[in-house]
Amino acid sequence: MSKYCVRVATGTFLDSGTWDNVSVSLVGPAGESPALPLDNFGKDFSRGAPRELPLPLRPSIPDAWFCRWLQLTPPQGAPLRFPCYQWLEGVRSLVLREGTGEAGHRLDGSQCGGGRGPGEGTGYFPGIPRCLAAESLKELDPNLREREHLGVTAPGSWRPGSSERWQCRRQGWHQGDPLHASPPAEYVFEHWQEDAFFAYQFLNGLNPVLIRRCRCLPENFPVTDAMVAPVLGPGTSLGSLYLVDHAILSGLRSSDINGRPQFVAAPLTLLHQRPGGPLLPLAIQIPGPDSPIFLPSDSAEDWLLAKTWVRNSEFLVHEMVTHLLRTHFVMEAFFVSLLRQLPMCHPIFKHTAVSQPSPASWSPFPAV
């Protein structure tokens, strides 16, 4: 009877070992070998430790195990490596393919296991993308929940000096020193109240997607010539007009923080640019009982407060729409579809599965 040797490697990062019971079988065209328990006294699979053994999980206390690979040494020939690189948890069986690819070979779910991924989704209210029907991250598959194997190693493998540098950085942040540690930060600190820098951010800031050429003023923005004449001065042409409308925030219900109600504004901002000159704000309307229109000719405090409301609204639109909706929600729809449809051995699955961030960093409404 031929004798094979099986070598199993556990992940090198924190908590990748397991106390669970694991067994392995060799499956071939002629049949299947009996299940061989990979067992000894104590913890069978310690972090980073390969095990070599001569060639059904049974219920126990759930303990996730990250398996990197299995290596099979036949009586004759080179060892065969079976890559795994995934978390295993609970009572389950896993079929692994030998890692050597074949040129021109078509991959499909019948050969290497169909795609598996998050279950059915649910929705909290109309208009919001559906989210996973899970109460917490603990209910997700461990390969979605645990992402340390994608680049975060255990503390023992940190590079020398990294913790010291991090400690210094944390102290620096606490003291506020890094706020002025770079030329851009110093420039912002000195010029953030200026009109030119305020308008500059609509084209070069974090959300340069709302500014539009203004051919005619909206009916709800009654800016008159008499209002802007003191700003433009006598004998000057208006030049190009631009409008930034945060109407998407209209009617948005805000929450309370520490018992204090918060407020959200949907301002209208009119900007102008003379030929060869900088882009400058011309008028700002803050919706309210009287929908006041603020001008650069107003008091410095009123004008700065109006610009602060606009900057706050710009940040909200960036985070909720430009960033969350148009980045995460769109990406997650493709990612979840990939998990459900593609087999794990598919090259696109391998590439995308490791590039997707941890669910802990996902939005509260992951797409399904």
Image: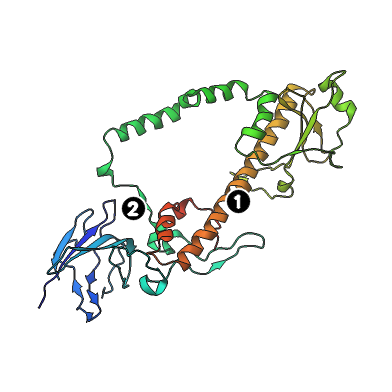
Secondary structure under tag 1 reads helix
Query: 284 and 101: which one is in front?
Result: 101
Tell me which amino acid carries mark 2.
His
Where residue 322 appears, as percent x and y from the top left, is 62, 46
The location of residue 217, given as percent across then percent down, is 84, 38
Regarding residue 101, the answer to whether it shows in the image is yes
The residues tagged by marks 1 and 2 sit, at their Cα atoms, a distance apart of 28 Å
> Looking at this view, is 360 or 71 the one in front?
71
Q: Which residue is mark 2?
A: 149
Amino acid type at mark 1: Arg
Residue 263 vs residue 349: left or right?
A: right
**Picture layout, residue 232 above or below residue 283:** above
Helix, strand, or loop for circle 2? helix
Q: Residue at x 39, y 58 (%)?
A: 350
17 left or right of 327? left
Residue drawn at x 34%, y 47% is 152
From the viewer's side, name the closer residue of 327 and 22: 327
- Above-or-below relation of 347 to 221: below
Residue most extreme to the top: 234
Q: Kindly tell me whether residue 261 is visible in this rendering.
A: no
Q: Identify the image quadrant of residue 93.
A: bottom left
According to the picture, the residue beneath numbered tag 1 turns out to be 326
